[in-house]
Image (cartoon, rainbow, N blue to C red):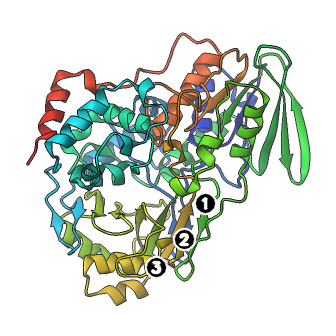
Amino acid sequence: MAKAYLVGSGIASLSAAAFLIREGGFSGQDIVILEEQDREGGSLDAAGSPETGYTMRGGRMFELHFACTYDLLSTIPSLDDPGISVTEDTFSFHEDFAWNDHARLVDAEGTVIDAHSMTFSERDRVELVACLATPEKLLDSKRIEDLFHEDFFRTNFWAMWCTTFAFEPWHSAIEFRRYLNRFVHLFKTFDTMSGIYRTRFNQYDSIVRPLVSWLTGQGVTVQLGTRVTDLRLAPGNALTVEAITCERGGKTETTALGEGDLVMVTNGSMTANSTLGSTDSAPALDTASSSGSWALWHALAAKRPGLGDPKVFDSSAKESTWESFTVTTRNPVFFKLMESFSGSEAGKGGLITFKDSNWLLTIVLNHQPHFRDQPQDTFVWWGYALFPDKEGDFIKKPMAQCTGREILDEVLQHLRFEERRQILDGSIVLPSMMPYITSQFLVRKAGDRPQVVPKGSTNLAFIGQYAELPDDVVFTVEYSVRTAWTAVAGLLHLDRQPPPVYKGQHDPKILVEALQTLHRR
């Protein structure tokens, strides 16, 4: 029987393994996942305890039209109730805890801004429509700031847009345009975020754990602590992997591939080189070491053309770095104050952005518990900032140099909470520095990302955030899942293809609603 080797254990590889079984008829025993780290899940991570503090580098948002993700997870039983699927659990949770943000933006005085208006000028509207109308091929190597004047980046729209999706003005105009088209149906609820879905717990607990449980139950092998260093390619015009070279336990191993064997590679990683700080220490910025996913992509791209250009994405850390932080406390006072401040109970309020903060801080109170093993007397919330290199408004040094306590202090002073000392003394704050977190948004041109199934490939596919799919958008779980399905269908020549990307821009009703939103006052 043919075997499949999946490099990396992020959501793309886990999805590919599931699709190989479900769509491709593979036995789980013929699928091997090779992971460099000591746990599965890739960027969908979450860990910790009440004693040491919980941590997660990020939290992914979903929406109604993530067709590939919901299709996949509709066949994966929930860990909490095996009688329902992960998709059913996610939809059920949304019904009970839908976001309805009443405090999306906060000004420099700590006062909630009415974010219903996008605060657009006529010039802003014209430039936005022009961006949407420009063919993608004409946006090669262009930045967002190349298409808009400076005032656009001071609008309510931009403050909400960039902190919802983590865009910076210097990021790719191609990706920005794709996002505008992909999520045009969310424009009318952009201030309340009511079109956003979340999983019941963090994505590691809600998605990765049930998916890994199902896969291993099917006989799939997950081999941790294994770094794939090279793929030997057969000579000739066809793109065929002959062997896989790995480092494991200090030894080098080579596995020869047989007839019909497949290899799927997660090329690049947005959370590579992430570092953790603590309540009393700042996280270090690490751009010197090289993760296996980036190193392997560099090695493959050097072998032959058509496999992308990884240096476009991993050589400009200054333009792709930001910092997040996770706060753990057993004192409910912060949650009570925030529920009063925001007008929403925890889990229903959505993102809160301090629009005028130098760091461009955003925080969110998750529904509790946010971890499956989280005790009832423990509370966890999360935040991030897009400008960690700038000096704080209250803590007079760059966020990147701040301890977790100092980051929390900056947030609390923006909020003007009198209970500041009590909250600080009762909180564990774990900041995370991520040098490549938005590297997939960096300015690019056609060909910089390899096709999922490159031209001439007989058994190699690329999956994840740095493989190229038309129309869909990176920095989403949906993109990774779609690349996985596309890879399986392409390599196995299956009739059943992934469902098409939702295109609300072709719906007159959606377009009218979007135009009305652009003109809100």
- Secondary structure under badge 2? strand
How packed is label 3: few (under 14 Cα within 10 Å), some, or many (20 or more)? some
Which residue is label 2 attached to? 49
Q: Compare marks 3 and 1 and give the one earlier in the sequence.
A: 1
Out of 72 and 299, give the one closest to the viewer: 299
Q: Would you identify the image quadrant in which residue 448 lies?
A: top right
Q: Residue at x 68, y 22 (%)?
A: 26
* Vertical placement of residue 197 versus 64, above or below: below
Which residue is label 3 attached to? 397
Q: Residue at x 20, y 44 (%)?
A: 189
Q: CA distance from mark 2 to mark 3?
A: 30 Å
Q: Is residue 493 left or right of residue 102?
A: right
The reply to whether residue 185 is in sight is no
Q: Residue at x 66, y 59 (%)?
A: 287
The x, y position of residue 218, in whole percent, is 66, 33
Q: Amino acid at mark 2?
A: Ser
How packed is label 1: few (under 14 Cα within 10 Å), some, or many (20 or more)? many
* Vertical placement of residue 179 versus 39, above or below: above
The x, y position of residue 315, in whole percent, is 63, 49
Which residue is label 1 attached to? 274
Residue 135's disc is: none
* Vertical placement of residue 143 versus 363, above or below: above
The x, y position of residue 126, in whole percent, is 20, 35
The reply to whether residue 312 is in sight is yes
